[in-house]
Image (tube, rainbow, N blue to C red):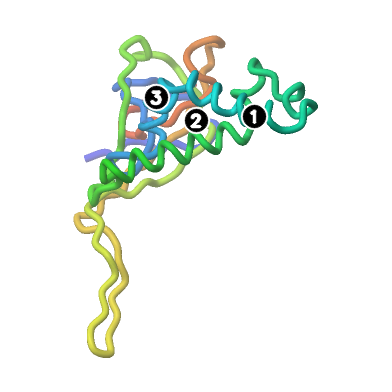
């Protein structure tokens, strides 16, 4: 039985299964709750405007509403509100998995491998201590997935780089 040829950085590959890895981790993350916080953006802006106007006028001029969304204080507040929503919902979880997005148009595209990494999936278990013994935490049913960061050879096609499982790629020999 022949082994599939290895992919290395700089190799060209064809996408066979167009399932891209969005992230590796636990089911719910804080970023999943940001759209809920963005829904109340107008109220948040009104509150901040009221707080800033009550202070120094120069601060208000520097933080005009068009630039206010980019201001780091607003970003920090949004992140903290998302964290509170996530915590209320019991975010996290024990199952560490790969999260995919499928892009059917990418099937058959030739890409260049610009990076490689290994991701671990499984069920988390916490560290435990016994009388005089200690056991570190880890993952049950641990699986290793080899991921390739790909750069698109055709400009303007999706993002300049994406992660995809190596098993979804086929090496192109030139």
Marks 1 and 2, the one that precedes in the sequence: 1
Left or right position of 93 against 52: left
Q: Is residue 28 above or below residue 19?
A: below
Q: Which mark is drawn over residue 35? A: 3
Q: Residue at x 24, y 62 (%)?
A: 125
Number of residues whose C-alpha sits closer than 10 Å to that of mark 1, classed few (under 14), some (14–19) or many (20 or more): few
Q: Is residue 66 above or below residue 125?
A: above
Residue 90 picture location, percent across and down: 26, 46
Q: Judge by depth and name the residue closer to the eye, 34 or 1.
A: 34
Left or right position of 59 against 123: right
Q: Judge by depth and name the residue closer to the eye, 153 or 42.
A: 42
Residue 8 picture location, percent across and down: 48, 37
**Are the two marked residues, 1 and 2, in contact with CB atoms closer than 8 angstroms?**
no
Q: Which image quarter holds the N terminus?
A: top left
Residue 79 picture location, percent across and down: 48, 37
Q: Residue at x 48, y 22 (%)?
A: 43
Instruction: Please count the marks in the image.
Output: 3
For disc 1, the marked residue is 71
């Amino acid at each position: 039985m022949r082994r599939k040829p290895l992919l290395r950085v700089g190799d060209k590959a064809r996408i066979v299964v167009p399932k891209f890895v969005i992230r590796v981790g636990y089911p719910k993350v804080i970023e999943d709750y940001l759209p809920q916080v963005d829904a109340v953006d107008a109220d948040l802006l009104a509150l901040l405007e009221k707080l800033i106007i009550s202070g120094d006028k120069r601060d208000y001029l520097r933080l005009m509403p068009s630039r206010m969304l980019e201001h780091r204080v607003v970003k920090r507040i949004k992140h903290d509100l998302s964290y509170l929503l996530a915590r209320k919902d019991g975010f996290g979880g024990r199952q560490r998995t790969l999260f995919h997005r499928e892009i059917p148009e990418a099937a058959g595209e030739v890409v260049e491998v610009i990076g490689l990494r290994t991701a671990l999936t499984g069920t988390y278990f916490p560290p435990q201590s016994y009388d005089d013994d200690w056991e570190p935490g880890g993952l049950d049913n641990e699986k290793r997935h080899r991921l390739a960061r790909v750069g698109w050879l055709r400009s303007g096609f999706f993002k300049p780089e994406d992660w995809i499982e190596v098993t979804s790629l086929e090496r192109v020999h030139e």
